Amino acid sequence: MKFSVLTLFPELVETYVQSSILGRALEREVFQFETIQIRDFAINDYGQVDDSLYGGGVGMLMMCEPVYQAWQQVAGEGKKSRTLVMQAGGRTFDQAMAEELAEEDHLILLSGHYEGIDARVLAEIGAEPVSVGDFVLTGGELPACLIIDATARLLEGVLLKEEAWQEESFSSGLLSERQYTRPELWRERQVPPVLLSGHDARIKRHRKHDSLWQTIQMRPDLLDE
């Protein structure tokens, strides 16, 4: 699988993806990753990629042609690709969508900045709006990182064990159970004895019950879906 990120700030995305678990998987060539600097396709020698809004308004809007040229560079590689634009009001990104995207061959993630991107180029390239929550950010780089992280970790070989993601929060529709490590007693707080029992069936039952309890307490909306 390949991730291509179109952005004005490639270093923000590169630093994240090339670090930790994703970075090690990238070194092992489990997936491919690249950033495209939209400013390389500026309309003049001054590096202009944005302009004022028609009809008035505050801020600047990213122009069609630089975005289109950057997109064409990666979309024309022969791979079947899917283009997402990081945009408030788009489809809300969740675990189900991450699993859906993990089946794709090539994801193109378009990160806007300023007031966003001219709507005409988004229509021309068939970009699907995706949101990571009901809040506003200064750019689409952070949402792009979130989508890459949640999607890439589902690919075979990124994590050491498949169970590492199959048993996590949201994969089963419930939140994860509470987890503990050494010492057994810390500031008068005891690890649940069942986790020390070595009885696999009881431990599994405890974790299932605690997972349900955590969901009821913190995300009851998940039980309504």
Image (tube, grey):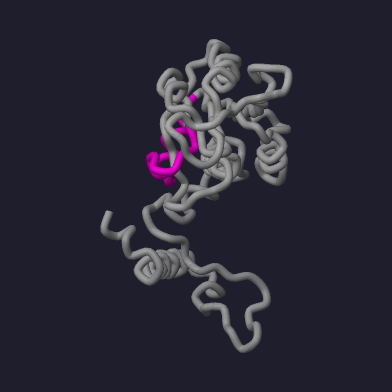
Residue 39 position (above or below residue 59): above
Residue 215 spot, x, y in % from top left: 38, 65
**Residue 189 vs residue 127, the one in the foreground:** 127
Q: Quadrant of residue 208?
A: bottom left
> In the figure, is residue 185 to the left or right of 11?
left
Q: Quadrant of the N terminus?
A: top right
In this orientation, does residue 23 appear? no
**Residue at the (55%, 40%) spot, across then down:** 59
Residue 171 spot, x, y in % from top left: 43, 50
Q: Residue furthest front?
A: 56
In this orientation, does residue 218 appear? yes
Magenta-drawn stretch contains 128: no
Q: Quadrant of residue 109?
A: top right
**Residue 208 vs residue 187, the one in the foreground:** 187
**Residue at the (72%, 41%) spot, across then down:** 15
Residue 17 position (above or below residue 167): above
Q: In the rendered structure, which segment of residues is drawn in magenta?
A: 85-104
Residue 179 position (above or below residue 5): below
**Residue 38 vs residue 73, the one in the foreground:** 38
**Residue at the (42%, 32%) spot, across then down:** 55
Magenta-drawn stretch contains 98: yes
Residue 156 spot, x, y in % from top left: 56, 35
Residue 147 spot, x, y in % from top left: 53, 40
